[in-house]
Amino acid sequence: MGGSYRFPIGTPGQKWGEEERKAWYEQITIKREYQKEVVPKIMALRERYDVEQYGALSYDTERFPLYAIKSRNWSQDKPIALVTGGVHGYETSGVHGALKFLETEAQNFVSHFNILVVPCISPWGYETINRWNPNAIDPNRSFYADSPAEESVNLMKLVASLKQKVLIHIDLHETTDTDETEFRPALAARNGEDYVEGMIPDGFYTVGDTENPVPEFQKSVIDSVQQVTHIAPADDQGEIIGSPVVQEGVINYPMKKLGLCGGVTDCKFGTTTEVYPDSPKVTDEECNDAQVAAVVGGLKYVISQL
């Protein structure tokens, strides 16, 4: 592909205006249903957890309510462990991995933490299998004051309402082949830039915070996931998606500066997971299990430090 590839919407070298955004929106189709695939799983957790609605997306408030799931017996004496998924709605195992963590493992940690899980921050993106919201804005670059993305605003309000500090934040993501075939070309077109082809790493990796990398915490996450699936190797330049590999399966980004969900709190222990669902070596369920393993590995490490 390289710079010769032209996204079908827009004029090369020119940023999108309202007309291009509208053309992009009009070719989007619904591919699956949040109310059928995600909400019933959330409601099934009400027997063991407190399920709270923290907002709804204005595109369709009935269709896209936003849910947070909290461990019972919330205590001022316990730190908060926050797990977020579906910031990019198309990253399926982020959503279903977060829910599977609640279904299978979270109860093992409620004596140590107040657990807060926000499984699907971008349900419109989930339904349309999209990285952006309907306004062609990436919620995962929009966690900052006066954000243009309501998905991000709703989560920031929820975090601001918490009475205690968030000690741990694990944000569940995927890196998919469509990042390279669809979403990055669209981003280049939207910004009026040339698309430069990249490489999708085969395997799991994490993104730490440049300002607070916590390498031992990252290692615990990687070691836990390694029991479930393979870790992404560095490329010939010693990088993963253009960033230097700082330890096996780990790169760092400046979370707050980039407006990433991983920077939404001032947590001491934070990581963003990246599962690769398009690998021929994994199943969808193994991807969900890798997300669960990542959370478990992170929580166990922090317990060892308490």
Image (tube, helix red, strand yellow):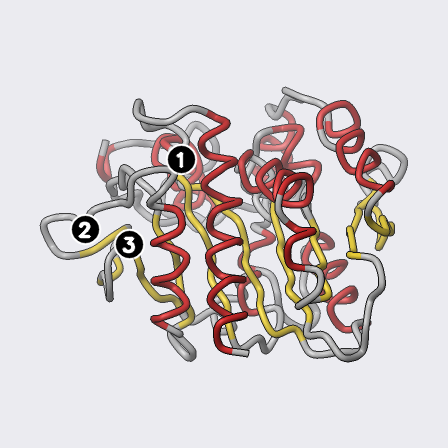
Residue 128 on image: x %, y %: 63, 28
Identify the amino acid type marked 1: Thr
What is the residue that sits farthest to the right in this orientation?
A: 62
Instruction: Tell me the CA gap for discs 3 and 2.
Output: 8 Å
What residue is at 40 percent from the left and 35 percent from the top?
A: 176
Query: Quarter of the image holding residue 254?
Result: bottom left
Q: Residues within 10 Å of mark 3 (few under 14, many from 20)?
A: many
Q: Name the foreground residue: 38 vs 129.
A: 38
Mark carried by residue 32: none
Mark carried by residue 249: 3
Q: Name the foreground residue: 15 vs 259.
A: 259
Identify the amino acid type marked 2: Ala
Residue 209 on image: x %, y %: 42, 70
Q: Residues within 10 Å of mark 2 (few under 14, many from 20)?
A: many
Mark positioned earlier in the residue sequence (3 or 1)? 1
Which mark's residue is nearer the viewer, 1 or 2? 2
Identify the amino acid type marked 3: Gly
- From the viewer's perspective, is residue 110 above or below residue 101? below
Element type where label 1 sits in the image: loop
Query: Quarter of the image holding residue 75?
Result: bottom right
Residue 305 on image: x %, y %: 49, 77
Using residue 296 as the reference point, say whether residue 163 is left or right of it: right
Which image quarter holds the N terminus? top left
Element type where label 2 sits in the image: loop
Mark carried by residue 234: 2
Residue 52 on image: x %, y %: 87, 51
Q: Are marks 1 and 2 in contact (CB under 8 Å)?
A: no
What residue is at 62 percent from the left and 38 percent from the top?
A: 100
Q: Are marks 3 and 2 in contact (CB under 8 Å)?
A: no
Instruction: Tell me the CA gap for discs 1 and 2.
Output: 17 Å
Using residue 290 as the reference point, say whether residue 279 is left or right of it: left
- Residue matched to label 1: 176
